[in-house]
Image (spheres, rainbow, N blue to C red):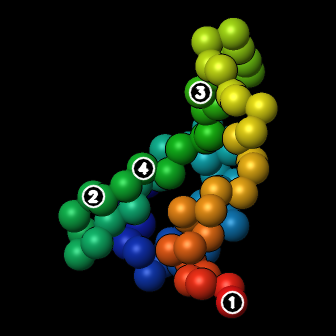
Amino acid sequence: MIVNISEAKTHLSKLIDMVYHGETVVIAKNNLPIADLVIHQPTGKRTLGLLQGKLIIPDDFNAPDSEIEQMFYGNAE
């Protein structure tokens, strides 16, 4: 099924339901196919901890830096 953008905006809920039930819906602009309305396919689970043991974060990572504070705040006299 091909629908123009204006029709798709008007009937989006109906079109989503049709796709959910296996229909193919193509959205067009001036009858030129632009996009396919498809069921979402998850790309996979995220893998946490990929950099574990590969990074070293110094203990003073969050400590104030006088040079940077000087650039932001100037002389605090």
Say which residue label 1 marks: 77
Q: Is residue 48 left or right of residue 65?
A: right
- Label 3 vs label 4: CA separation? 18 Å
Residue positioned most to the front: 77
Q: Earlier in the sequence, mark 1 or mark 3?
A: 3
**Residue at image location 51% in from the left, 74% down from the top:** 71
**Residue at image location 75% in from the left, 48% down from the top:** 62
Q: Earlier in the sequence, mark 2 or mark 3?
A: 2
Does 76 appear above or below 55? below
Q: Is residue 3 left or right of residue 29?
A: right
Nearer to us in this view, 60 or 53: 60
In the picture, which quadrant includes the C terminus?
A: bottom right
In the picture, which quadrant includes the N terminus?
A: bottom left
- Specify few, some or many for label 4: CA neighbours under 10 Å numbering under 14, 14-19, or 20 or more: few
Does 67 appear above or below 21? below
State the mark number for residue 33: 2
Q: Is residue 1 left or right of residue 51?
A: left
Q: Which amino acid, by three-letter code, is at mark 3?
A: Thr
- Label 1 vs label 3: CA separation? 55 Å
Say which residue label 4 marks: 36
Say which residue label 3 marks: 43
Q: Are marks 2 and 4 in contact (CB under 8 Å)?
A: yes
Does 12 appear above or below 49? below
Q: Earlier in the sequence, mark 1 or mark 4?
A: 4
Q: Which amino acid, by three-letter code, is at mark 4?
A: Asp
- Specify few, some or many for label 2: CA neighbours under 10 Å numbering under 14, 14-19, or 20 or more: some
> Element type at marker 4?
strand
Q: Nearer the viewer, mark 1 or mark 3?
A: 1
Q: How many circles with numbers are drawn on the protein? A: 4
